[in-house]
Structure formats: C-alpha cells, structure tokens
Image (spheres, rainbow, N blue to C red):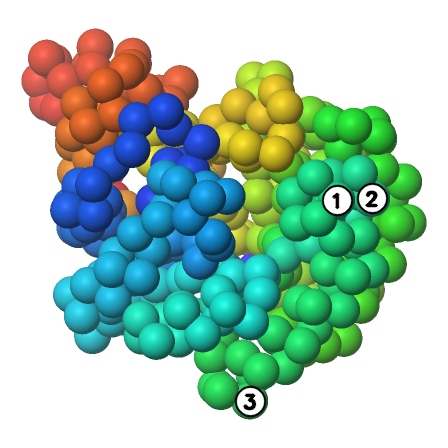
Amino acid sequence: MNDLLKIYEVGPRDGLQNEAARLSAEQKLRLIDGLVAAGLRHIEVTSFVHPQAIPQLADADEVMAVTETRHAADGVELIGLVFNERGYDRAWAGGCRSLAFGAAVSETFSRRNTRNTPREALDTARALVERARQDGARTRFYVMTAWICPFEGVIPPQKTLAVVQEIADWGVDEIAIADTVGYADPLSVGRLIDSIARRIDIERLAVHLHDTQALGLANATAAMQAGIRTFDSSVGGLGGCPFAPGAAGNLATEDLAFLAHKVGLGTGVDFARLMEVVFELERAIGRPIGGRIRQWWESNQDQEPRVEFN
C-alpha cells in the first residue's frame, strides 16, 4: 500500500440531504469551491433523486452543471449519485462523468430507502453500471447497511460478502462498504474488511462511516489497519440518512485528515483552508458544526508557531 489516503468528500450531497436548512444553489457552489481550494479532489456533488424525496437536493441539475464547468478541468473528480434511469439521464446531461450507485444488504432498509427489495435494487443498479461502463464513466457503488441495519440489527457478514462479490464481478471501479447508521464497531469493521480483501483487490475498496456512536475515528483506524486507503467523509461532520432513524453525521473530513496526518498518511488537504470551509458552512447552516478536532484546533491557533500541515 502507498502512503497516501484518498478522501472522498460527501458533504455537498450526504452532508446536506438531511439538514433542516436548505442551502441555495449558490451557497452549495461556494461550498464546493471552498472544498476544491482546500485540496479535496474527489467530491460527491449531489444526488439525482426526485425533489419530493429529498427537497434539499432539488437543484441537483444546476449545481452539477456549474460545478463541472468550474472544476472538471482542474483534475477534480465530481460525482453524482443516481438510483434510476431518469437520474442517470439528468446526471449525464449535467456533464457528470463519474457516477455512484447503491443498494442495501438489508431487506427492510432497502424497501424504506428505494421501495425495492435488495435484489430489485441490485438488478436496477447492474443495468445502470453497464450503461455507465459503455459510456466510459467511472463507477462507484455503495453497499449500504454492510454491518448493521437500523431495523433488522446485525447483518450476517456472509450476506454482505455475497453482495460485494456480485458487484465486483460487474467491474465497478470502486466499492464503498457503508456503515449507514454508524453502529459498527472497530473489531467488526476490521474483520469484514479482512474477509472482503481476501476476495477482492483492496485498492478497489472504500469505507463510508458515520459517527453516531462516537466510533467513527476508531472504525476508520481499524479499516486503515486492514489496508483501506479510501475513506468517505463530510466537512463539518454533516450528514445523515432521511430513511435511517438515528443516523447521525458522517465522519468529519477534518477529523479524518488530521488522523491521516498523525499516522503519516498524506491527503493533499490544506487544513487551515478546510477549517475555514467548516466555519463558513456553519454560518450558512445556522447551527454549530465541526468534527472532534475543532476545539483543539481553535485553542492552538493563538499559539506561535501556528499548527499547520498539508
């Protein structure tokens, strides 16, 4: 494995989809501009779902189109999440050339989230993945409720393994193993990643973590020790799933970046600029946000020399 950690930023999509405050398209574009300026190079911009399902992302077409115009030439990967043909059409029309798809392992969560069974969701997703591959798009797949379902409880590892193996056989570029509600523990994270990595090239794998039970960083560390070098996170720790009761925010990007720094993994993130994004987003959201590192960071900025890293 290399000494770099890839941060896959989900703040503009996963971070905002469950917020009471609805940011304008211009505010979202400013957020994405700030993330790019802070060094983030893989950003999930939005989700192309029906506006009635997630009103916070009703401006997906505009946000994606403008973001592609501003940043695609800068080497930034701009991703759109889609669940059906209509969403795919909208994403493609907006210039999106990196597409994310998803399906849940859990039957109950799948029905609540997409109104499909896991099998139906996988069949739909397979057709979308095949279309994306023919179009030359990069593909990513979320395996949701990989560890625990908020309705069914612990998911048997063999069920998750079977889903991941099927998706890998489709030729998907990246597979994100998702702790959708943030109930996983470090030991189960490490065990599942070890099991998957014995079957699939670990460089194709990512981990998507939430911090619901204050174990986000511990779970990230366990995944790192298992060899994962691609992690999803959300600036300010924003996030949550409208269809998963009790799902708190994602692992905060600033916490993940600082953890990588402490263990000697480069991220390319300008931490000071990233924290500026957090503070500006907080003002836009209208409530306190920020990862666990925020208090320490703020207390150290009055010291000389200032704490800085990249």
Q: Quadrant of residue 253?
A: top left
CA separation, marks 3 and 1?
A: 29 Å
Q: Quadrant of residue 212?
A: top right
Mark 2: amino acid: Glu
Question: Residue 107 has which mark?
Answer: 2
Q: What SS does tag 3 mark?
A: helix
State yes or no: discs 2 and 1 in contact (Cβ < 8 Å).
Answer: yes
As drawn, the label of residue 134 is 3
* Closer to viewer: mark 2 or mark 1: 1
The 10 Å Cα crowd at callout 2, few under 14, some 14 to 19, many 20 or more, is: some
Q: How many marks?
A: 3
Amino acid type at circle 1 is Arg
Q: Is residue 287 above or below residue 91?
A: above
The residue nearer to you, when weighing 300 against 104, is 104
Residue furthest bottom as drawn: 134
Q: Is residue 20 above or below residue 192?
A: above
Q: Is residue 186 visible?
A: yes
Q: Is residue 227 left or right of residue 134?
A: right
Name the residue beneath numbered marker 1.
111
What's the residue at 31%, 61% (across, down)?
A: 61
Q: Position of residue 112 (x, y in %)?
A: 70, 39
Q: Horizontal and vertical percent for residue 251?
A: 48, 32
Secondary element at tag 1: helix
**Picture quadrant where residue 127 is located:** bottom right
